[in-house]
Image (cartoon, grey):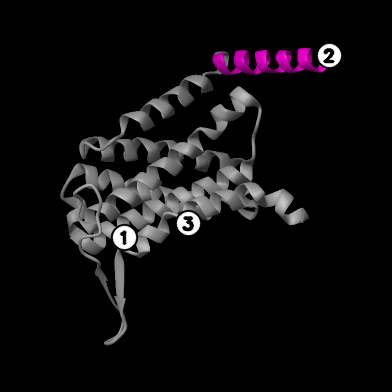
Amino acid sequence: MCFLKRNYGWMIVAILAVLPLIPLSKMIQADFSNGLQLSLVENIGARGKTTLEMMYHVSGEFAIRWLTAVLTCTPFYILFGVRNLFVRQAMGIASAIWSILHFIIFIWAEGLITTFSQFNYVAGLLAALIMIPLMLTSNRKSMSWLKQKWKTLQQFAWAAIVLSLLHVAILEKTWLIYAIVVGIGLILRIPTIKDRIISLRKKKKQITTVKI
């Protein structure tokens, strides 16, 4: 029971991150008759998309959603005073896994060479590569080992989100909402604005406590 109380946050994140894999798994057919052979189940895409396009869409959307969620953790703390580092790390791992999965699907369908044929593909590749060391260091041992360097390393998440936004913007996908959320987060991080909001939040809490 104590384990659940301490870790329920990242467990919820893990469940939410895994659930979309269920419809994705139904798009792939495994054949073991002559070794392992994987193929796509045709005509399973929604809204006029092919199966492959649907896999692109689902994996890419969840990759950028989780990355955006990670970058909203600090603004969430500034506004509401709620912070959980290990939930944030779980979100980062989810984002990295979905980014890598998105890239693997692309390589499977188009081949590695195609990745370097267009700028938006290269941007997506760089974003996925940046997420790998962030994912591998999203744990207590890495924090203890890297110390102050750990925070510096995690700042590369900003490069990953910029590259991801470029990737989807060039592809003319829905990207504006993510850019707006990230932009608001950046504004809230401005020291004068951040300090002012935190000060007002603490004063409000003190007033509420006195009234009680």
Measured Cα–Cα span from mark 3 to mark 1: 17 Å
Say which amino acid is labelled 2. Answer: Val
Label 2: few (<14), some or many (≥20) within 10 Å? Answer: few
Point out residue 57 in the picture as x, y percentages from the top left corner.
Answer: 29, 48
Q: Which residue is disc 1 drawn over? A: 104
60 relative to 192 in the view: left or right: left
Question: Tag 1 or tag 3, which sits nearer the N-term?
Answer: 3
The answer to whether the residue labelled 2 contacts the one labelled 1, judged by CB atoms less than 8 Å apart, is no
Q: Is residue 29 above or below residue 19?
A: below
User: Any magenta on residue 25?
Assistant: no
Question: Tag 1 or tag 2, which sits nearer the N-term?
Answer: 1
60 relative to 92 in the view: left or right: left
Magenta residues, as a range?
193-212
**Mark 2 falls on what kind of element?**
helix
Q: Which residue is disc 3 drawn over? A: 18
Give residue 211's quadrant in the image: top right
Q: Which residue is disc 2 drawn over? A: 210
**Mark 3 falls on what kind of element?**
helix
Choose between 101 and 117: the one closer to the eye.
101
Give the foreground label among 3 and 1.
Answer: 3
Measured Cα–Cα span from mark 2 to mark 1: 56 Å
Point out residue 93 in the picture as x, y percentages from the top left corner.
Answer: 50, 51
Q: In what quadrant of the picture does the N terminus appear?
A: bottom right
The answer to whether the residue labelled 3 contacts the one labelled 2, judged by CB atoms less than 8 Å apart, is no
Choose between 75 and 49: the one closer to the eye.
49
